[in-house]
Amino acid sequence: YTQLSDELEETNSGVVALYAELDERGRQLAAANDAKTRFLRSVSHELRAPVNSILGLTSLLAEGALDEDQRIQVGYLDSSARALLGMVNELLDLARAESGRQHVHRVRVDLAALLGDLQGTVRPLLRPGVALHVDVPTGVELHTDPDLLGRVLRNLLTNAVKFTDAGAVDVAVTVPEDGVVVVTVRDTGIGIPAEHLETVFEEFFQVPNRLQPSAKGTGLGLPYARRVAEALGGSLQVASVVGEGSTFTLTLERTTAPALGRVLVVDDD
Ligand code: ADP
């Protein structure tokens, strides 16, 4: 009995030590993650000012007397600087969403109206022959941030359109249970390989070896969309079959109460 009890004691202290170590590892990981977010935030912040100066100078240049060739060059300079600014802004948005300092301003949002507006902006991006359907029951209202929700949905819709050559992009809204609203964005595009279904939510990741113009993107859209979905008290998941298409599922709480600990309304940018 004594031997058994000694062994038990030993195992017990082993387990305690293991837990302490795991706890410490967890703390280290969280600290590293915080440092990364701070780095991302300050780098993108610092980059914004010089890029804006370049843009100011290119518009000054464009006003001057230029020959045709120079005008084309200034045009390139301007569009490159704009692309860079877009990227820097995306990085800054992501860093803000990751830091938990996301500014969430909740109001009553009519989902049908929001999706209707989005449909209009995404339609021109459709490839010829690809249809876009939006099926929303009227009267679905959420207490949420329309700007943030709009950005999440725009990300999903532009991706669906970008990676679909034929068939359709279908947006559907369901209310499976009280207090929950589910938005699905389904496409019949190229799909995502099973091994990348989670990695697409990592920063800068783009599915490699594609004929599609994925290189044009930044790989920041989905990580941002998932973070923001979480900040809104929801979640974002994907299912996909290569060659058949992908379905992104955004689950949202209809509620009034902001998700605890995720919503902080302090931002000085
Ligand atoms: P971006 O679109 O700027 O490349 P995202 O973070 O939005 O960045 O998406 C990351 C990657 O996930 C894309 O580059 C693409 O490889 C893949 N992806 C996203 N949405 C889809 C989709 N609807 N169909 C196929 N692949 C997709």
Image (cartoon, rainbow, N blue to C red):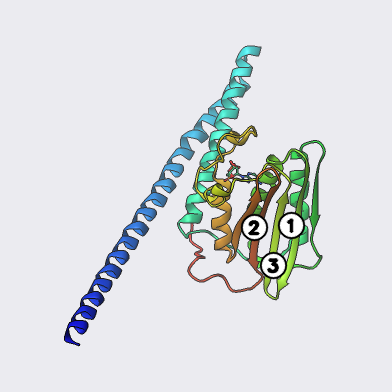
- Residue matched to label 3: 181
Q: Where, by quadrant of the figure, is residue 82 drawn?
A: top right
| Classed neighbour count for the residue bearing mark 2: other residues with Cα under 10 Å, few (<14), some (14–19), many (≥20) | some
Front residue of 79/56: it is 79
Please, what secondary structure does the residue beneath circle 1 have? Answer: helix
User: Which is more N-terminal, label 2 or label 1?
Assistant: 1
- Residue matched to label 2: 149
Q: Position of residue 244 (x, y in %)?
A: 71, 46
Camera-side mark, 1 or 3: 3
Q: Residue at x 24, y 80 (%)?
A: 8
Residue 217 vs 143, above or below: the answer is: above
For marks 1 and 3, give the CA distance. Answer: 14 Å
Q: Is residue 117 left or right of residue 26?
A: right
Q: Position of residue 33 (x, y in %)?
A: 39, 54
Q: Where, by quadrant of the figure, is residue 178 drawn?
A: bottom right
Type of amino acid at the residue the image marks with label 1? Leu
Asked if the residue at label 1 sits under 8 Å from ligand 1, the reply is no
Front residue of 54/218: it is 218
